[in-house]
Amino acid sequence: MRIRQLIFKIPIKYLPHKMFNLFKFLVFKNFSIEKLSYKPLSMDIEPTTGCNFRCTMCQVSEPNFKALNMTIETFQNLIEQNLQLIKVKLQGMGEPFVNKNFFEMIKICDDYGVFVETITNGSLLNDKIIDQIINSKSIYRVSVSIDGASKEVFEKIRVKSNFENVIKNIKNLSKKNISNKNKLSLRAMVLLQKSNYHQLEEIVKLCKEVGFHELEVQVQLTGWGKDEWENKNRDSDIHFDFNKKSNIQLILDKYNSNIFKTKIVEENILSKDNKCSYPWHNPYVSANGSIVSCCMVADPKVNNYGNINKEGFNHIWNSRDYQDLRKSINNHTLKDFCKNCYKENRE
C-alpha cells in the first residue's frame, strides 16, 4: 500500500504533525546535512529480543543472549514523542509475537494513525493471531522469513523451527487474507547464504505457491557490528557479485508477475558513492527504548545514542553523537560498526 493511500486513513488531529514533517522531509532529504529540521517518517521498533528460533546467522543464537520484551509504556512513550510517524516496522532480533503486548502496540498505532509492517518467522501465526492481524486498522504488510524450500535446508538454518508448521501457517494467513479482499500485502524475505543458494528457484516457486504477493532476496549477511559475527557470517556469505546477480535475476524474472513481484535487495550493499541513509530517515529502537544506528546493528551494546525514556527522542535525534554518525558517513570516515555494509570492506 502506498503512503498516499495510507494518509487518507490517518485521524485528522494527527494529520498536521505528519504532513508538516513530511513536507520538511521532502524538501531537505537530499541535502547531506548532519543537523536535521525534520524527524523520521518511519522507524524500526523491536518488540522483543526473545525468539523461539536459533537461526545460525543471528546473534540471538549466542548461549548467553538475554530476552527482553519492550514494555507497553515504552512503546506508548515512543509514539507520543513521534506524532510525525507515518509507519513503523515491528521487527528486531526477536520474534514479534513472543511479546504478549504486541496487539496493544497495534491498538496504539491504530489510535495515532501509524501504519505497521511486521516481520515474523511465521511459527506463531495461529488462527487467533491471524484474525487480529487482519482486523487491525494499521497493519498493512506482513513479511515472513523463508530461507529454504525443504525441511532439511530450512531447519538447518532456522534452528528449532518446524518447516511444515510455518508453511501451514502462511497458507492459512493467505487464505484468510484473500477472504478479506487481500487487505494485507504478504511478502517473503529470503536471506541467501551458501547453505540455501542451491535452492533459490525452489524457494521462489514455494513462495509463489503459498500465496505471497512479493519476494525480496537479501544477498548479504550482516555481522551486527561485531567482529566475531562478521567473521562467522562471512564464511556463510555467498559473496554477491555480477555473475551471482545475473543468475539470481534470471530465476526471479522467470516467476515475476503483476501479482508476484520479485526483487534483489541491494540497498544495503554500500560504497563511497552509495552511502548509508539510515541515520537520516529510519532509526532503530531497541526493546529497552535505546536508539541504535540501524537494523543492521540492532544492538544497543554496539552503539546507543540515548534512551527515549530518559533523554527523549527530540534530543537524541540531533544530539552531538548522532550528528557525528551522519558526518562520518558523509565524509566516509566510517565507524567500525558501519564498515561491514560497505563493499570495499568485504572484498
Image (cartoon, rainbow, N blue to C red):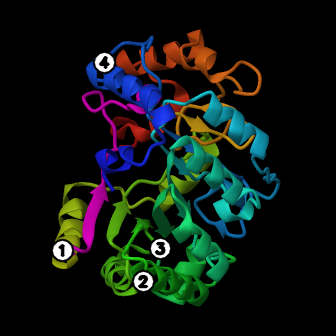
For the N terminus, the quadrant is bottom left
Side of 147 where 20 appears, left or right: left
Look at label 1 and name its amino acid. Ser
* Residue bearing the label numbered 4: 28
In space, the residues marked 1 and 4 are separated at their CA atoms by 35 Å
In space, the residues marked 4 and 3 are separated at their CA atoms by 37 Å
> Where residue 172 appears, x then y in whole percent?
51, 86
| Residue occupying the point 57% across, 29% down | 82
* Residue bearing the label numbered 1: 257
Q: Foreground: 148 or 134?
A: 134
Q: Secondary structure at mark 3?
A: loop
The image shows residue 124, relative to residue 74, as above or below, that is below
- Based on the picture, tell me whether residue 75 belongs to the magenta stretch: no
Q: Foreground: 26 or 306?
A: 26
Cβ–Cβ below 8 Å for labels 1 and 3? no
> Where residue 248 appears, x then y in whole percent?
24, 68
